[in-house]
Amino acid sequence: MIGELQWQEYAGRTHTDLPATRLDDTSPQACPPVGRVVLSKRGVALDHALLVPGRFIVGRTTDNDMQIDSKFVSRHHMQLITSADNCYVEDLNSTNGVFLNGKRVRRHKLQAGDVIKLGMHEITYSPVDLPAEPGDETHATRTTVLKDSDTDLDSDDDESESDDEEQDESSYSSIARGS
């Protein structure tokens, strides 16, 4: 009966005879950075990250490449899609949106000096020139956890900052409602 079905065992129908030279090395390879982002809040630089070709996701949860713990930032708010030549910002259906140089965008190609606003935080993009010496390269990106409480500059300004946040919250809640 098996002969009628022309059944072949699994090992017989797979290509296990491929030469070893066709096997690719799947271990992570070092890539030179092609861009840089600087995260700031109220004009104070909080962190930076180097961009390598691929996706760089920004949001509120810990599984993002850059975490911003803020009520104005969605769990997966936006992504930067980087290639050797270009970098694009893309909104990941966030509640409060992504603003590039003051205008709400869904997807847009970034230029040097562009400022992306997520809630009360700003991310400034700049391309990175490749270093002349091979030993001067910096590699990879890292995950950054930021909390709104980490960015308070003076404890004396708590009242004015809470007023600013209430004012900012009302303007963002109107965006979320679509009014």
Image: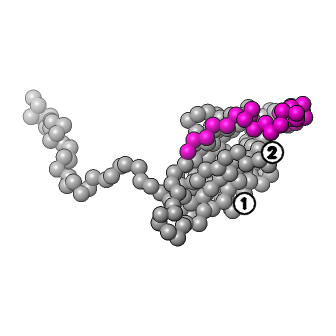
Instruction: Report x, y in % for residue 75.
Output: 64, 34
- The amino acid type of the residue labelled 2 equals Arg
Which quadrant, please, contains the C terminus? Answer: top right
Identify the residue under disc 2: 42
Q: Which mark is residue 59?
A: none
Does 55 appear in magenta?
no
Question: Along the polypeptide, which appears first: circle 2 or circle 1?
Answer: 2
Specify whether 59 is left or right of 131: right
Would residue 74 be seen by someone viewing this image from the given angle? no
Q: Main secondary structure of the magenta part?
A: helix
Would residue 144 be seen by someone viewing this image from the given angle? yes
Span colored in magenta: 142-169
Specify whether 123 is left or right of 170: left
- The amino acid type of the residue labelled 1 equals Gly
Instruction: Report x, y in % for residue 130.
Output: 55, 66
Specify whether 9 is left or right of 138: left
User: Foreground: 143 or 75?
Assistant: 143
Question: In the rendered image, which quarter is residue 129 located in?
Answer: bottom right
Give me the residue at 80% from left, 39% from top: 153
Describe the element under mark 1 as helix, strand or loop. loop
Identify the residue under disc 1: 113
